[in-house]
Image (cartoon, rainbow, N blue to C red):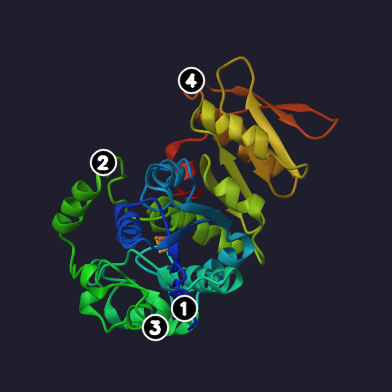
Amino acid sequence: MTTSTPHKRKKAHAIALFSGGLDSALAILLMLKQDIEVTALTFMTHFGCDLKDRSSCGSNPYPMAEQFGFNVKLMHLGQKFVDIVEKPKYGRGSQMNVCVDCRILMLTEAKNYMEMVGADFVVTGEVMGQRPFSQVRDRMNLVIREAGLRDRLLRPLSAKLLPPTEPELAGLVDRDMLERIYGRSRKRQMELAEEFGLSDYPTPAAGCLLTDAGYSNRLRDLLAHTERISFDDLNLLRVGRHFRLDRHTKVVVGRNESDNDQLRRLKQPHHYHLEAVGVGSPVTLLIGPYTRENVEKAAMITARYTKARHEPQVRVAVQNGDDPMEVSVTPAAEEDISYVIVR
Ligand code: SF4
């Protein structure tokens, strides 16, 4: 008589979208509680989902991963994300945010990664009824369909409100151990955080830079005046005050030392650098044709943001390659800049 070794089932492997926020952390912890292996994907974009942010849109995933024992993979969405920001298929939210296209892109990347590493399903921290724009049921279904995930997407925080997914039906996930959270109250999430011993998590934030009104105005202006935006253009949008002189010309003025340092770093060979002489001055970049009129306007704007703004004349140095020059200008008045500032 032969005895067969009992078949040991392969440990299930989930790919989780992980922003570092509470909901996505809890979704992962609910999987770990079931002894499911988790690889967390943390996405980065040019629109603020930086690891150093403390928004729920992109905080550092590593401390939590170390505390609870899961893997992290960082993915920069680069040009793919810029493409959807330029031309979103499903429109925008209240500002320039493209949440539906963004979720589709992230889930598509997660699905591709799942298939590449032979994982079983994808997990997100989405909660039914929590957000008006991207998380209502129809939108969720649309996102899943477009990402091609169908029933291989598990949302553990609201799973019991949704039809069973493939990993639940296949016995990889115990549905009884999932949640039925609905709406904006964070009460159940707080309870779960306490149960799991999760104390250091960011408070929910509005989202990435695309939800910020000031940033969105600068981006709208850029899109209206640029055929194909570059990463350099986008990096500049995060820094300083922006002024649109005409279709081809803009001026960026540092608001503080940090902006000034960044502008020095971001300056490209085709940008012109201006600074007032003999007074504390912001760093200004003139981006556009190097004409007398443009230089004088950029110099007047620069002078306005110095301590000498009430003086009749301020000297401003202009660096133009190997041919530096100086102009003397009257600082711009409030009414002068109100026409050109991009707020
Ligand atoms: S706010 Fe919207 S567009 Fe920005 S990262 Fe979040 S889901 Fe994506």
Q: Nearer the viewer, mark 2 or mark 1?
A: 1
Q: Are marks 3 and 4 in contact (CB under 8 Å)?
A: no
Q: Residue at x 51, y 30 (%)?
A: 304
Residue occupied by mark 3 = 151
Q: Circle 4 is placed at which residue position?
A: 307
Residue at image x 34%, y 81%?
Answer: 165
- For mark 2, give the secondary structure: loop
What x and y, as percent, mark residue 257? 53, 26
Q: Earlier in the sequence, mark 4 or mark 1?
A: 1
Is residue 68 something that shows in the picture? Answer: yes
Disc 4 is placed on an element classified as loop
Which sits earlier in the primary sequence, circle 3 or circle 4?
3
Of the numbered discs 2 and 1, the one sitting upstream in the chain is 1
Residue nearest the observer in this picture, 75 or 228: 75
Which disc, if any, is residue 199? Answer: 2
Q: Secondary structure at mark 1?
A: loop
Q: Is label 3 in a helix, a strand or a loop?
A: helix
* Direction from residue 191 to residue 308 in the image, left or right: right
Q: Position of residue 277 (x, y in %)?
A: 64, 19
Query: Can you tell which of label 2 and label 4 is closer to the viewer?
Result: 2
Can you give x and y, in whole percent of width and height, for residue 247 in the image?
63, 59
Ligand 1 contact, mark 3 (Cβ < 8 Å): no
The amino acid type of the residue labelled 3 equals: Asp
Residue under label 1, please give it. Answer: 3
Q: Which of pointers 3 and 4 indicates the residue nearer the eye? A: 3
Indicate which disc residue 224 carries.
Answer: none
Is the residue marked by circle 4 packed among few (<14), some (14-19), or many (20+) residues within 10 Å? Answer: few
Q: Quadrant of residue 328?
A: top right
What residue type is disc 2 on? Ser
Three-letter residue code for mark 4: Lys
